[in-house]
Amino acid sequence: MFTSILLPIDLSDEATWTKALPAAVKLAQYEGATLHIATVVPDFGMSVVGSYFPEGFEEKAMHEVGEQLTGFVNAHVPDEIEVHPHVLHGRVYDQIIEAANRVGADVIVMGSHRPELKDYLLGPNAARVVRHATQSVFVVRGE
């Protein structure tokens, strides 16, 4: 049923992967699917914000996050699973949807948390992905 699974994570927020990663791994094992693990480095939003950072900051951040993601994959994904790490850059929910389309994901597995007031006003990334993705989205709730 599934041949390609996308698992978006935030390396700095363990809640985004502690429950979603085991679910994605089990699904990949059961289906014999390829697992794509993605993390997003947010952009500055406004160009004036970027002017406060040194030249090359984004490229350096992307490289460092790539190294962290590779270490994460090596430490947490069993060797028998075909896995591809992806470091993305931009708006989190847009990048997740674009990555799912680019890698041909059949399903997106992502962690979510109990919404806070700010989430009701702005909308969490998981909710936006659920609303706009053409793939099935499996949201794994945390504590």
Image (tube, grey):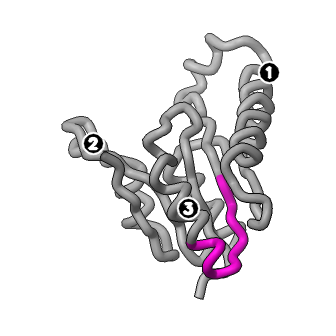
State left or right for residue 37 relative to residue 119: right
Q: Is residue 50 above or below residue 75?
A: above
Q: Secondary structure at mark 1?
A: loop
Check residue 31 for magenta coloring: yes
Which badge, 2 or 1, is on the more N-terminal residue?
1
Which badge, 3 or 1, is on the more N-terminal residue?
1
Task: Give x and y (percent) for residue 134.
Answer: 50, 75
Q: Residue at x 69, y 54 (%)?
A: 77
Q: Which of 122/16 is in front?
A: 16
State which quadrant residue 57 falls in.
Answer: top right
Q: Residue at x 74, y 66 (%)?
A: 81
State which quadrant residue 107 falls in.
Answer: bottom right
State left or right for residue 70 relative to residue 51: right
Q: Is residue 1 above or below residue 69?
A: below
- Circle 2: residue type: Asp
Q: Secondary structure at mark 3?
A: helix
Tag of residue 97: 3
Task: Give x and y (percent) for residue 99.
Answer: 65, 60
Q: Which of 41/79 is in front?
A: 79
Q: Which label lies toward us, 2 or 1?
A: 2
Q: Are marks 2 and 1 in contact (CB under 8 Å)?
A: no
- Residue, disc 2: 119
At label 3, counting other C-alpha atoms closer than 10 Å, the crowd grade (few under 14, some 14-19, many 20 or more) is many
- The N terminus is located in which quarter? bottom right
At label 1, counting other C-alpha atoms closer than 10 Å, the crowd grade (few under 14, some 14-19, many 20 or more) is few
Which badge, 3 or 2, is on the more N-terminal residue?
3
